[in-house]
Image (tube, rainbow, N blue to C red):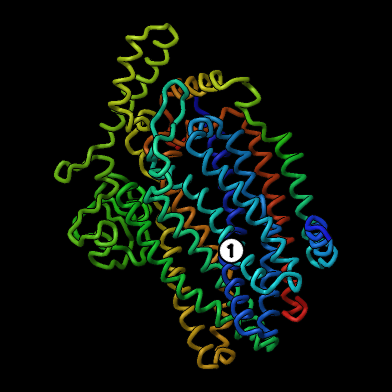
């Protein structure tokens, strides 16, 4: 048996013999789906990546942000 | 350009996700090594009992790992959305450590994890044991890189601010990875994980002994966990001492808040226990505490390795202390404003293509660069973090850490003399110490992060300037979503774990 087949069967057998593991994989997939396909897509856009197409514009935007707000209040600490 | 509610919500959101994430991480760090030790005993002795013991704890380790995995990724999402200014500014510093972490974690853990869980009786005992140790080492090394990044925020070294790219750029990689704050933070954090792992094993084993179930398994587990816990507790205290020393040197306001110290002095004592005077204000002459018990000289010695050292208090740091050479915060604010105005002039000069003015502004900026963050503050008193939260969190952490040392010592002693199952009070205390271990870890992070306010990057960037301008309601919605999601994950973990624990080690 080739080494690739051995590795494949190793994983297949491993997954087949899982007991509590199957439940855990299900939870993991649901969790990752929520993270990447709901939270990331709908709630967490990368603002600088989506707003600007190049690093120069991103840098200018941030420089603008950090120089225009010269002071912060106590509550904003 | 202020939106107080937005900043508070963004901070709350980050705190919530970080605290939830930290419910899963320490057990992974600690239990992985305990399993590796147990399996080493199995390989050395060839005893089938030790194999069953190893497999039982490995199952609980797997549950915790599976539920907790990727919970930290949420914080990276938040960097891009809620903290876009910050993530751009630190991108050059954080990029390398986080990329290394991702690669190492993925390749090391995913490869050897499979052998660890699927490889029983399929690979040789030695290969399996090596995989288990590599999972433990890999998990701990993953923590290294993120803690280097965190250490840099507490003590930014090896970098220079580039005015054209608006980024802190790494000038010396070794300064960043050997940053003394990062090194002590890493060691203190992973050792807290080892203690948590030990508490977990002792607590669950205590439950078995209290129930009179699987007693040999429970006693053997306690023997390993108590030995590991005792050694790592001593290590935890040592690394905590070094962390506090670094705080004294690099973040004196945090140290003052941790100790509720307003009026600094030479030969200062450390507060063992006390209640803060809630009416106390900066600069007034009221007592700092309603009552307290102090250990004389200890703060000077532990903070500065010299019992005669002066420990600055909050008043010294805000109003300055000429005798000791402490600069008043008002002067730092003035210098910070010069740096900020120079940055603004540089930007305008570059826009107008006035290279001479740009050069002049750059020279001025470099002269006052280290005060940059102070330029954003309105009032010198803003340099002080929330004192009660920092003080009580610190003292709860230290108190619990001391209790864990005693618990490990007693558990080890009574197990060694074969009387542990008769110590029902100790067994109950062992069981109830599991949540206390989590509490100690969480309050430790509160000390580290709340204690360094108002800074996102120490002295360079206040938290309020690091945030993105977003709609507050969208941040509030995601806080709600996270609360529901993470609570569901936590309930799932506890439920699955309890089922496994009830099955006992023979069912693992």
Residue, disc 1: B136
Q: Quadrant of the C terminus of chain A?
A: top left
Which of these two is toward me, B262 or B103? B103
The answer to whether residue B203 is seen in the rendering is no
The residue sitting at 52% across, 44% down in the picture is: B97
Q: Residue shown at 24%/66% (left/top)?
A: B296
Q: Give the vertical position of B11 relative to B301 (above or below).
A: above
Pinpoint residue A58: horizontal percent, then vertical percent: 55, 22
Residue A55 vertical placement versus A46 (above, below): above
Q: Left or right of B237: which side holds B314?
A: left
Left or right: residue B389 versus residue B369 is right
Please provide percent x and percent y for residue B89. Answer: 48, 31
Q: Quadrant of residue B374?
A: top left
Rendered location of residue B275, percent (x, y) = 37, 61
Front residue of A11/B188: it is A11
Q: Looking at the image, how many numbered discs can be counted on the residues?
A: 1
Q: Residues within 10 Å of mark 1 (few under 14, many from 20)?
A: many
Specify the quadrant of the image occupied by residue B439.
bottom right
User: What secondary structure is marked by label 1?
Assistant: helix
Residue B45: name its quadrant.
bottom right
Q: Residue furthest front?
A: A1
Q: Is residue B150 visible?
A: yes
Read off the chain for label 1. Answer: B
Is B461 situated above or below B97? above
> In this picture, is B372 found above or below B122?
above
* Residue at the image point whose x is 66% and y is 84% from the top: B46
Residue under the image location 66 percent in, 88 percent down: B215
Q: Residue B172 placed where, x, y %? A: 39, 38
């Amino acid at each position: 048996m080739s080494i690739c087949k051995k590795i494949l069967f190793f994983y297949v057998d491993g997954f087949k013999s899982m007991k509590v593991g199957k439940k855990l994989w299900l939870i993991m997939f649901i969790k990752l789906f929520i993270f990447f396909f709901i939270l990331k897509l709908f709630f967490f856009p990368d603002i600088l990546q989506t707003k600007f197409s190049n690093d120069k514009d991103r840098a200018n935007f941030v420089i603008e942000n950090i120089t225009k707000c010269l002071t912060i209040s106590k509550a904003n600490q | 350009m202020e939106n107080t509610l937005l900043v508070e919500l963004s901070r709350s959101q980050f705190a919530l996700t970080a605290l939830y994430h930290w419910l899963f991480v320490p057990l992974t760090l600690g239990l992985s090594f305990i399993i590796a030790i147990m399996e080493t005993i199995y390989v050395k002795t060839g005893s089938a009992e030790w194999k069953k013991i190893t497999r039982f704890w490995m199952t609980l380790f797997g549950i915790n790992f599976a539920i907790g995995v990727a919970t930290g990724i949420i914080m990276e999402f938040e960097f891009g959305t809620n903290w876009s200014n910050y993530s751009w500014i630190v991108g050059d510093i954080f990029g390398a450590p986080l990329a290394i972490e991702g690669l190492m974690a993925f390749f090391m853990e995913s490869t050897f994890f499979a052998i660890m869980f699927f490889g029983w009786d399929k690979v040789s005992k030695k290969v399996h044991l090596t995989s288990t140790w590599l999972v433990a080492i890999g998990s701990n090394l993953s923590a290294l890189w993120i803690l280097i990044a965190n250490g840099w925020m507490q003590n930014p070294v090896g970098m220079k601010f580039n005015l054209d790219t608006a980024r802190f750029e790494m000038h010396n990689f070794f300064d960043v990875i050997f940053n003394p704050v990062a090194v002590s933070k890493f060691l203190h954090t992973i050792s807290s994980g080892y203690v948590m792992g030990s508490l977990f094993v002792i607590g669950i084993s205590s439950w078995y002994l209290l129930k009179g179930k699987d007693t040999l398994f429970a006693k053997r587990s306690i023997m390993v966990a108590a030995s590991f816990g005792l050694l790592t507790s001593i290590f935890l205290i040592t690394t905590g001492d070094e962390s506090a020393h670094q705080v004294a040197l690099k973040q004196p306001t945090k140290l003052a808040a941790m100790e509720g110290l307003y009026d600094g002095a030479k030969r200062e004592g450390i507060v063992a226990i006390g209640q803060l005077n809630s009416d106390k204000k900066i600069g007034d002459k009221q007592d700092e505490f309603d009552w307290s018990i102090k250990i004389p000289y200890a703060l000077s010695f532990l903070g500065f390795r010299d019992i005669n050292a002066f420990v600055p208090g909050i008043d010294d740091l805000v109003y300055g202390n000429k005798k000791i050479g402490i600069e008043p915060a008002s002067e730092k604010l003035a210098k910070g404003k010069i740096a900020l105005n120079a940055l603004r002039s540089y930007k305008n000069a570059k826009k107008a293509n006035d290279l001479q003015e740009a050069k002049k502004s750059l020279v001025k900026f470099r002269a006052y660069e280290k005060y940059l963050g102070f330029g954003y503050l309105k009032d010198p008193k803003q340099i002080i973090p929330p004192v009660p939260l920092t003080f009580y969190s610190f003292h709860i952490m230290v108190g619990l850490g001391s209790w864990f040392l005693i618990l490990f010592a007693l558990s080890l002693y009574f197990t060694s003399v074969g009387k542990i199952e008769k110590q029902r009070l100790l067994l109950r205390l062992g069981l109830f110490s599991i949540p206390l271990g989590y509490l100690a870890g969480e309050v430790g992070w509160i000390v580290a992060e709340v204690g360094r306010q108002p800074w996102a990057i120490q002295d360079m960037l206040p938290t309020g300037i690091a945030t993105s301008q977003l709609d507050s309601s969208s941040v509030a919605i995601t806080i709600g979503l996270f609360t529901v999601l993470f609570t569901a994950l936590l309930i799932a973990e506890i439920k699955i774990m309890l089922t496994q624990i009830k099955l006992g080690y023979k069912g693992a």
